[in-house]
Each structure stands twice: as structure tokens, then as C-alpha cells.
Image (cartoon, rainbow, N blue to C red):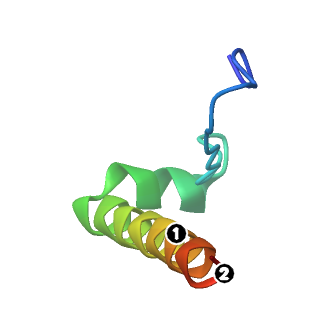
Amino acid sequence: MVLKAPDLPSILFETGYLSNEGDAKRLDSVEGRKAIAKSVTQAVEIHFARRMAAR
């Protein structure tokens, strides 16, 4: 359900394809999921820092 409520702020992250062996291995590993979570966290923090700096 992408953009089911387009009037609300949202983020869509596509982190890989389960049909891709490399992506599936990364998504199945604790280390891979931690790396993805860290990257997502950094991206969100950077986004909001830039928005606040622009005010």
C-alpha cells in the first residue's frame, strides 16, 4: 500500500529484492539489517537537520 494516504508525510525505502541472492543474504543477516537500519537512521536525521537549518 504505497501512498494510501498521500496527505501524510511518509518514507518508502526499498532495501533489496528477495529474488536477488545477494540482497536476500544481506536482508537475512543480522549485520545486513543493522547496516540498513543505520543507513535509514542517518538519512532521516540528515533530512530533518537540513529542514531545520533552512528555517
> Which residue occupies the foreground of this view, 55 or 22?
55
Real-space Cα distance between discs 2 and 1?
A: 10 Å
Q: Is residue 46 above or below residue 48?
A: below
Could you tell me which residue is drawn at 65 percent across and 46 percent down?
17
Question: Horizontal placement of 28 versus 9: left or right?
Answer: left
> Which residue occupies the foreground of this view, 49 or 42?
49
Q: Are marks 2 and 1 in contact (CB under 8 Å)?
A: no
Q: Is residue 52 above or below residue 14?
A: below
Q: Is residue 38 above or below residue 25?
A: below
Quadrant assignment, res 45: bottom left
Residue 35: x %, y % from top left: 37, 72
Could you tell me which residue is drawn at 44 percent across and 61 percent down?
26
Position of the N terminus by quadrant: top right
In the orientation shown, which residue stands out farthest toward the front?
A: 55
Residue 49: x %, y % from top left: 50, 79
Residue 10: x %, y % from top left: 61, 39
Q: Amino acid at mark 1?
A: Phe
N-term-proximal mark, 2 vs 1: 1
Quadrant assignment, res 34: bottom left
Tag 2: Cα neighbours inside 10 Å, few (<14), some, or many (≥20)?
Answer: few
Residue 15: x %, y % from top left: 58, 54
Could you tell me which residue is drawn at 44 percent across and 76 percent down?
42
Question: Horizontal placement of 36 versus 43: left or right?
Answer: left
Q: Which mark is residue 32?
A: none
Name the residue beneath numbered marker 1: 48
Q: Amino acid at mark 2?
A: Ala
In the orientation shown, which residue stands out farthest toward the left?
A: 30
Tag 1: Cα neighbours inside 10 Å, few (<14), some, or many (≥20)?
Answer: few
Quadrant assignment, res 3: top right
Name the residue beneath numbered marker 2: 54
Could you tell me which residue is drawn at 61 percent across and 72 percent down?
51
